[in-house]
Image (tube, rainbow, N blue to C red):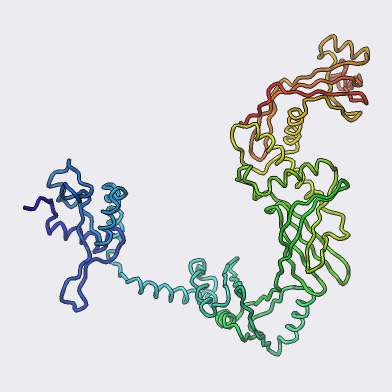
Amino acid sequence: MNSRDDFTEATKIKLLALAANLCSRCRVMTVGPTHSGDQRNSIGVAAHICGAASGPGSKRYDPNQTTEQRKHYDNGIWLCYSCSKLIDNEETFHDANRLKTMKANHLAYASTLVGVALMAPFEVKNEIRAGIIEATLALCGSGAGKLDLTAVLEGYEDHLKSIDPNYEVEITTTNRKVRYDITAKEGFVPSISIIPSAETRSLLFEKFENLRLTGEDIVIPSEGIDFVGIDIFQELKKTNPKSVIILKSKKHKIESELFLESDKGIFSLGSFQSLLKGGKRVQDYSGRALNGLFQYNFIVDLENEKGTMEFGSTIASWIGKKLLDIKHLPKLLKAHKFLEQTSSYKFTVECEIGNTTLKIPKGIQNQPENVLYFFRRNIKALYLLNEISKTLPIKVSIISPVTTDNSIEIADFSLLLASKPQPERLEPGTLLFNSRLDELPTPLAIDLWCQRENLYLSVTEQYNRTSDLYGNLISFPRWNFGFENFTPVLYSSIDENDRNYIFVNIYSNENTTVAFGLENGNFELL
């Protein structure tokens, strides 16, 4: 006696038909004729979403279902034998709800196939390949600008690579122009002959001579030359008769080291690789270090003994990173200590070329102040944020590159208070404090008015300050500090609102000391 609640033949046919004869999971065709054509060849099965019977081996059995519910079309899904077996083997993952969703998605897909001619995978592959080549040839030839190249670039790259597998090919498009970058693979040394036309010969010779001297790219119309030894060029010339060919000189990687130099000494920021290109007369050095924080380009004319140098700096690689995940953080924090000891500095780069060390810039002392300032300011802000983060309960991230001089100054001052609780001597003439005399405590105001010696002044900031360091809005604790042995200067103002008041400025002298302290040593991240 059959205790299973199996589907009727009519229900099985309905599951097969509405699934469009496709497996609802992998979408292979499940039913068709045998090779001889006289038998049915089926790999499909009407599978139960919730098991047809209880007991060992039953999958997803629901005791709350009635017999009619188990045998109903809604409890069935059309699958191939392989997917049916796989689903039952992973019963926990493929629960009833997942199978119902799978069935619904497949029925929606199958509804789009009505009236559409289907192709086997090998037919699809051949059709796509032929379409890619045809469309791209049309675009890159006389039909340029009429089709969307982005849809066919990858296929056409594969087509060109198949012509000669010794080369890498990369295609890009900008402003309706198509660019093909063709590079010999590592370890392959190409042997290429260039045959110019009579009209192009003298121009090409001149350009090659310039390449030898300066390393400048050779730009020449493709219709004026033929290539022997690289079929890819000939293919491109055939499909792009009006194209321009650019031959670039090879760039050499050279070991380099970046330094900060000042009257206080030299500090190494680390090693990196520069790129050298050029020729016998002009050489071009370029590179980036510290994950892009430092960039340079140095061009030297050996014949005229002239050089030009450009520097750049960006913190783009910091944005979105947790502070402790920033590359070279320990080195940058050490660089801050070096920069704090000097008011002026410059970048220098040393490149190893064979057995020779080239120092860049050689004889060039003027470096752009805005780049030096940007570099120094961001090193300082990074140091301050790192110090503050030690007192915060959470890890901070670099959210925004916006920091103002004022925010760094506030942070710097607060950190000074936090890190130097002991009395410290200041430079004579430093402005310590200013106020209206009548706003000070009366005994202190009298002492200042009488210019008494050995005075002591205690000041407490009555409000919290905040600073934005790379998108981290940080609140600083209130601070207090005391000055001893200072020079008061009394004055009046010509301003109409202040002319009735006496003001006092307090300056440090040779004997002034200052003691710092914080009311609460905790910084807060707002």
Q: Position of residue 406 (x, y in %)?
A: 75, 35
Instruction: Examine the rendered structure and indicate whether residue 526 appears above or below residue 287.
Output: above
Q: Position of residue 117 (x, y in %)?
A: 30, 70
Q: Position of residue 501 (x, y in %)?
A: 86, 16
Please state if 79 lies on the left or on the right of 139 as rendered: left
Please state if 155 lies on the left or on the right of 78 as rendered: right
Which residue is painted at 91% across and 28% down in the image? 429
Instruction: Examine the rendered structure and indicate whether residue 417 appears above or below residue 78.
Output: above
Quarter of the view holding residue 320: top right
Quarter of the view holding residue 240: bottom right
Q: Residue furthest bottom?
A: 198
Q: Is residue 93 visible?
A: yes
Q: Quadrant of the C terminus?
A: top right
Instruction: Examine the rendered structure and indicate whether residue 229 appears above or below residue 263.
Output: below
Which residue is painted at 89% across and 21% down in the image? 493
Relative to the observer, which residue lies in front, 418 or 79?
418
Instruction: Examine the rendered structure and indicate whether residue 17 appears above or below residue 76.
Output: below
Which residue is painted at 22% across and 63% down in the image? 44
Which residue is painted at 76% across and 19% down in the image? 460
